[in-house]
Image (spheres, rainbow, N blue to C red):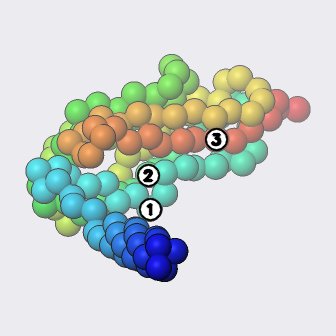
Amino acid sequence: MKKQFFFTLVFALMVSVVSFAQNVQTKPVAQNSNLAVFQWDKTTYDFGNIPQNQPVTAVFKFKNTGKVPLVITSAVGSCGCTVPNWPKDPIAPGESAEIKATFNAAAAGAFNKTVSITANVEGGTAILTLKGNVEVKQ
């Protein structure tokens, strides 16, 4: 009798845990309605092989899918060789815009640079990546 009670108790506990886990996984994450939301076309731009001393520009397109205007307060390259250009005016909900990042390609070899975007989004920042390989001109 004790064994039957014990197995019934263990079985009930397992059913409860599985049910709870399924509920947690399927429950939508609440979004803070006081924040804007970046919806990027892509966050990494791979230039492939590019010639040395010829600057290249990546264009990162996004849409504000939040319920409030998206305000970008800064965009900073990971080094002086990467210069971002971003919209200074707020981007209304549902509107699209773009951020351009120019890499000067002065040093030969592989590169992996980032642009840190600060805005009124969850986490406060977004990271964009530029990568490729600068080949020496022959």
> Which element is circle 3 on?
strand
Q: Which residue carries the number 2 mark?
A: 60
Task: Specify whether residue 31 is in view.
Answer: yes
N-terminal-most mark, 3 or 2: 2
Residue 28 rendering spot, x and y as whole percentages: 28, 69
Instruction: Check disc 3: other Cα within 10 Å, few if <14, some if 14-19, many if 20+.
Output: some
Instruction: Check disc 1: other Cα within 10 Å, few if <14, some if 14-19, many if 20+.
Output: few
- Amino acid carrying label 3: it is Lys
- Amino acid carrying label 2: it is Phe
Residue 13 badge: none
Measured Cα–Cα span from mark 1 to mark 3: 17 Å
Residue 90 rendering spot, x and y as whole percentages: 15, 47
N-terminal-most mark, 1 or 2: 1
- Amino acid carrying label 1: it is Asp
At a point 23% along the width and 33% down the height, the residue shown is 73
At a point 47% along the width and 43% down the height, the residue shown is 128
Left or right of 63 in this view: 5: right
Residue 131 badge: 3
N-terminal-most mark, 1 or 3: 1
Q: Which residue carries the number 1 mark?
A: 41
Q: Is residue 125 above or below residue 40?
A: above
* CB within 8 Å, label 1 to label 2: yes
Instruction: Check disc 2: other Cα within 10 Å, few if <14, some if 14-19, many if 20+.
Output: some
Which quadrant holds residue 92? bottom left
